[in-house]
Image: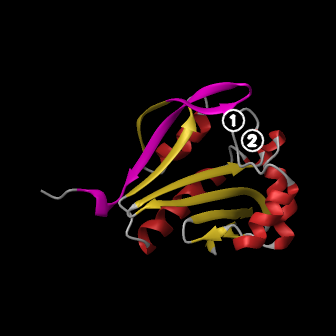
Amino acid sequence: MLEHGDICIRCIEDTDLEFVSFCSSPVVYGTYQGFRFTSQNALLNAYQEDGFWSADGGILLVEDQGEAVGLAQITFVREGLVRVGLILLPDNRGAGIGTAVLGMLRDYLCENYPIARIEADTDVENIAGQRILENNGFACEGTLRAYRFYGGAYHDSYLYSYITNLGRCSL
């Protein structure tokens, strides 16, 4: 569990499954692609298999003042490379929670794993997501063309990265 002020990032418990399912709905992810499970059975099977956490990463619950407000995803891609993602309930956006959560994840990963690079992508139209990444020291590296499919069409995303001290060359 990670805590900073009123914000907590923790493992998902069985009592959180309804919330996780809700985060898979268009009400939460809105215009952009979000966390999705194809069915309640798929959600339950994934949870029963590993609690949404394995050596490859997983999904964590984000709470603000004890209330579930979103999900964070960490994926260990390969040695030194991690991808992160975040989705917040619409009513909890714009309050600094996303910036705080990403900072907590970044700091935890840098302090506890031999990470050289943390990556994230965000839709080119998701200005708030871009701001969250930039406020946490992530740099935009370029455009991933036709990267995500939602709303009946392919959409571009920006690729962002945070290069840790392990990834920096010292000449």
Asked if residue 26 lies in the magenta stretch, the reply is no
Secondary structure type for disc 2: helix
Magenta span of residues: 145-168
Q: Amino acid at mark 1?
A: Tyr
Q: Which residue is mark 2?
A: 29
Residue 120 x/y as whole percent: 51, 47
Q: Residue at x 70, y 44 (%)?
A: 34
Residue 152 x/y as whole percent: 73, 25
Q: Nearer the viewer, residue 42 or 130?
A: 42
Q: Are marks 1 and 2 in contact (CB under 8 Å)?
A: yes
Residue 95 x/y as whole percent: 68, 48
Give the Cα separation between the discs numbered 1 and 2: 6 Å
Q: Is residue 80 above or below residue 125?
A: below
Q: Of the numbered discs in the image, which one, if any, rests on residue 140?
A: none
Q: Which residue is mark 1?
A: 32
Whether residue 151 can be seen here: yes
Residue 72 x/y as whole percent: 64, 58
Q: Residue furthest top?
A: 153
